Image (cartoon, helix red, strand yellow):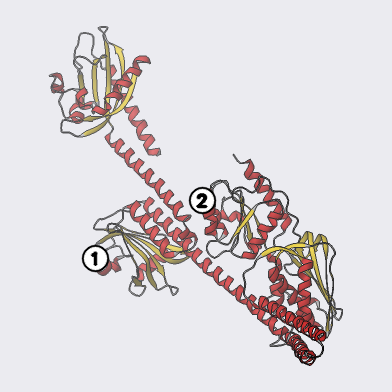
Amino acid sequence: MMELVAAIGVLALVGLAVFGWLRRQLPEPGNPRLELDPAHLPGLYYRRSADGQGAVFVAGAVVDLTGFTTEQFDAGLASLDALVASEDQRLIERSIDEAKRGDGSYAVEYRLLTRLGETRWVYDRGRLRTDEHGLAVREGVIVDITQRKIYEQRQHEQDELRRREQQELVRIATSSAVIEGRLSEAAQMINEVAANLLLVERVSLWLLAENGRTLTTADLYERTARRHTANTSITASDHPRYFDALRAERAIAATDANTDPRTSEFATGYLSRHDIISILDAPVRVAGQVRGVICLESVRQRRQWSVEEVAFAAELADQFAGALSNHGRRNDAIERKQLEAELIQAQKMEAVGHITAGIAHDFNNIITAVSGYTALAREYSHRDPQMLTACLERIDDAIRRSRLLVKQMMKFGAASPAAVTRIDLGEQLMGTLEFLRAVLPSSMEVESSLSLSTLTSLFDADQLDQVILNLALNASDAMGGQGLLHVSTDVAEVKECFCDACHHTFSGSYAMIRLADTGTGITADVRQQLFEPFFTTKGEGRGTGLGLAMVKRLMHEYGGHVTVASEADRGTTFTLYLPLAEEPVPIAGGERGIAPVLVVDDDVGAGSFIAEWLHSHGYRARAVTSANEALRIARAHPGELQLVITDYSMPEMDGVNLARAMHVIDPKLPLLLVSGYGAEINISDFGDHNIRAMFAKPIETEKLLTAVRAAMEERAAAP
C-alpha cells in the first residue's frame, strides 16, 4: 500500500513539473505555435478554448499516447474529446465546472481509446486562464498512468483475496467440524477453501502415521471435477528427502516440482501421472510434531508461489492441526467419561458385595416370618378367623419389607443417569437409615439425631444414598461389624474450613451430615491418601479403594466438601457439607422467553446442580449436556442469552472452543469457565473470547454467584 501511495505522489509531481515547464515555454504574443522538441516532453501537452470549442493545440508524446500524429490533430482528423471513453466524459466536465468555481485548476483521471483500440488510463492536470489575447483558454498535461492503474487493480484484487482468506479462516476455525475434531469433514472444508481461493486444481490433506513413516490422505479435492477421494499412501522409504523436508521446513514451495530436490522423488510417478508442475506443501504440526501435510498442486501450469500464498497454506495447515487436537481431546474425554461410569458401577458392585450378607440375613428373617405365619394361618383357618386375619397381616408386612428391600437394591445397583433435585435431607436420610439397618450386620447399631429444621440441598438422591452407604460400609469394616454408627444433621455456618478431599478451604452456609463411628480410627499418614483412587488399607481381595474416591467426586460435583476427624482407637467422624438450597426468590422479568443463563456440562448431575442452584438464587438457568445444543440455542435466540457457564473438558467441544464459537455468534456474551483442572489452566492463554473467570471444581458457590452477578450486570450495561 505504501508503494501505491508513493507511485501516485510521483505521478502528481511529474504532472506539476511538466506543466510548469511547459508554461515557461509558452509562445510569445502573436506566435501561434509552441517551438518545442516533442521528444523531450514526458506527456501530451494541450491548449484549447475554455468552452471546449475550436481547434486543440497538442504537443509532446502525442503518438505514444493516442496513436495519432500532431499533424492529424491540426488537420482535424483526430480529436481528444472523441478519444475519451464515453462513460468518462462526465468526469472531465465535472472537474472543469469545479475549476470554474474554484481557483481554475483541475486534475482528473480517465480512459483514452487509442487509434488501435487500446485503452489507456491517463492523468490530466491543467488550469483555466486568460491568454495574451484576452481569451479564456484551458491548458494542461496528460500523462499515461496505465501501469499504475494495473498495479492498483492487482493490489485491490490481492486485498480482496486476503479479506476473503481471513473470512474463510474464521469460518473454518468456528465450524463444528474443526471444533469437534471431525477430521474427514474438516479436511474436505479446508481443501475446498484452498482450491477455490488460490485457484489450485488439486488440494489434499494427509495424515502421518504414529510411526512417522507413512502419509495417508484424509481427503483429496479436485476443483474442476468437484470430487473428493481418499486412501492414497506414500512412505518415507520411497521418498526420504520429502519426509526430511516436511520436518525441517515451514513450507515446501516448489515452482518446478520435477527438479526441486525436495519433491523430485515424485517426478516419474505421482507428478507425471497427474500432470503436476508446481507444488506448495505446508506441514500440519501439533505440539511441535509433524502430524500431516496440506498439499496444493498446480496442474499443467508453472506457478511461482507468492509469500502470501505460502502464509495462507500454513494457516490452513494450522486449522487442521486444531481439528486434530480437538479430535484427540474428544476421544480422551469420551474415554474418561466411560471410565468414570465404569468405575462408579464397579464401586457399586463392590458395595453390593459388602452388603450381601446383610441382605441375606434380612431376607432370611422375612422368609422365616412368612413361612411361620403361613403355618399359623393354616392352623387358625377353620377355628379362629380373627387370628387368621392377624397372621395374614403379618405376612403382608413381610412382603412389603421384601419389596422395599428389592426396590432399594435394584435402584442402588442400576447404572442410571444423575437427576438433580431439591432434596429434603431429613426425609431422604430416614429412608437411607432404614436401608442401612437392613443391610449392615445386626451386631452393629445405627442411631440418628436428625435436625428438626428442614434442610434442603441440591443433589441426586440415589447418589447421596451411595455416599452414605460407602461411608457406612467403611465404618462397619473399621468396627469389625460391631459398634455404633451415629448419623446426625444440622445447619453449619462455615467461616473457614479445610476440605480433606480437595485440600482447599471453604466457607458459607451448608447442610451438614455427620457420620461418627466407634472404630479403630485413622492415622495421620493414611488420612493424607484417604480419598485417592485405589488406595485401601483393607487386605487383598477385600476392597478396590474406590469408595472414598467416589465420595469425593460426588460431593465436589455438587459443590460440597468433606472433613475427617479421627484418632487411633478413638473412632472416626466424616462430615459432609452440602450447599443449602434456598427457597426460590422471585425472578426479575418473569418466566417468558428462554432462560438467560445457559449451563453447559456433559455431566448431567453437575450441570443440573449449577442450574438448580442459580434458580434458587433468582436466576433463570437451563442446563444442556452438549456444546452443539448450546450453539443451536444461541443461534436460534440471538441476543437473548445473558451468560454462559461451561465446563472446560467435554467430548464434543471443549469450553474454550465453545467460547470462541459463542463469540462469533454474540461478541458481547460473557462466559464463565468451570474445570476440574483449575490449577493447570490460565484463561489469559485463550485470548479475548469474553471468558470472564474460571472456577475449579469443587465450585465455591458464593464466589460463582458473585461472578454471575457481575457478568449479568456487565451484560445489562452493554450497549
Q: Real-space Cα distance between discs 2 and 1?
A: 48 Å
Q: Quadrant of residue 183?
A: bottom left
> Taking the image as drawn, is residue 18 in sight?
no
Q: Quadrant of residue 268?
A: bottom left
Apparent side of residue 4 relative to residue 144 in the rendered image (left or right): right
Vertical comparison of 422 with 129: above or below: below
Using the image as rendered, state which of residue 405 and residue 575 is in the foreground.
405
- Quadrant that contains the N terminus: top left
> Taking the image as drawn, is residue 144 in sight?
yes
Identified at 26% across, 55% down, the residue is 302
Residue 272, label in figure:
1
Neighbourhood count class around disc 1 (C-alpha, 10 Å): few under 14, some 14–19, many 20 upward: few
Vertical comparison of 537 with 42: above or below: below
Using the image as rendered, state which of residue 535 and residue 671 is in the foreground.
671
Residue 309, label in figure:
none
Expressed as whole percent of the image width and height from the top left, the position of residue 504 reads 74, 64
Apparent side of residue 484 relative to residue 357 in the rendered image (left or right): right
- Quadrant that contains the C terminus: top right
Disc 2 residue type (three-letter): Arg
Neighbourhood count class around disc 2 (C-alpha, 10 Å): few under 14, some 14–19, many 20 upward: some
Name of the residue lying farthest toward the top? 134
What residue is pinned by disc 2? Answer: 635
Using the image as rendered, state which of residue 419 and residue 290 is in the foreground.
419
Q: Identify the element where label 2 is drawn.
A: helix
Disc 1 residue type (three-letter): Ser
Vertical comparison of 87 with 683: above or below: above
